[in-house]
Image (tube, helix red, strand yellow):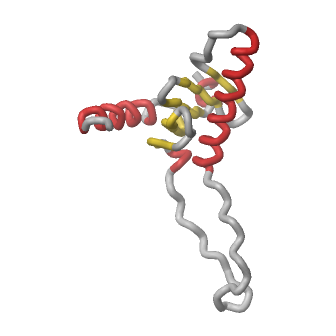
Amino acid sequence: MMSTAGVESVDATLQRITSAKGVQGVIILQATTGIVIRFGGVLFERRPASPEPLSDGGPSTEHEAEPERTLLERYATAATALVDATRESVQDIETGDDVRFMRIRTKRHELMITPDPSFVLVVITDPTLQEAQ
């Protein structure tokens, strides 16, 4: 278990990264399970839920649909899958080699992923802010 000083250090580092220009979100995952340990950034701020209108105004008698996975869950799942697939490909090329850093750019975001044996750090930025420099 991490000491209080260790947790505070992680939180301070997370805050520092999250406040950097262009950073939209940061996720720290447990490497073997993909479970989110910490996260931050405007991309994952909670938005108020909009109430679902009911057709007759009363409670629904049908089974509720499975709630949509949150954006955080989708990024965590994708990052875990990307790291696993890339590690496997790197091992196929040269046994004993491993992934140290991944950078993936889409139209909307750039993901910088740093896998470690214990944790995976995912930083999501807005590439349009970097182009404007």
**Which residue is at the front of the view, 7 or 130?**
7
Vertical side of 94 occupied by 29: above or below: below
Q: Quadrant of the N terminus?
A: top left
Quadrant in the picture for residue 17: top left
Vertical side of 60 occupied by 23: above or below: above
Image side of residue 104 versus residue 46, left or right: right
Residue found at x 57% / y 67%? 49
x, y (%) of residue 41? 48, 42
Image side of residue 75 versus residue 65, left or right: left
| Residue 106 visible to the viewer | yes
x, y (%) of residue 16? 38, 31
Residue found at x 58% / y 32%? 125
**Which residue is at the front of the view, 126 or 37?**
37
Residue found at x 72% / y 91%? 56
| Residue 26 visible to the viewer | no
Residue found at x 74% / y 86%? 55
Vertical side of 85 occupied by 65: above or below: below
x, y (%) of residue 116? 51, 23
Quadrant in the picture for residue 8: top left
Image side of residue 65 versus residue 102, left or right: right
Q: Quadrant of the C terminus?
A: top right
Image label count:
0
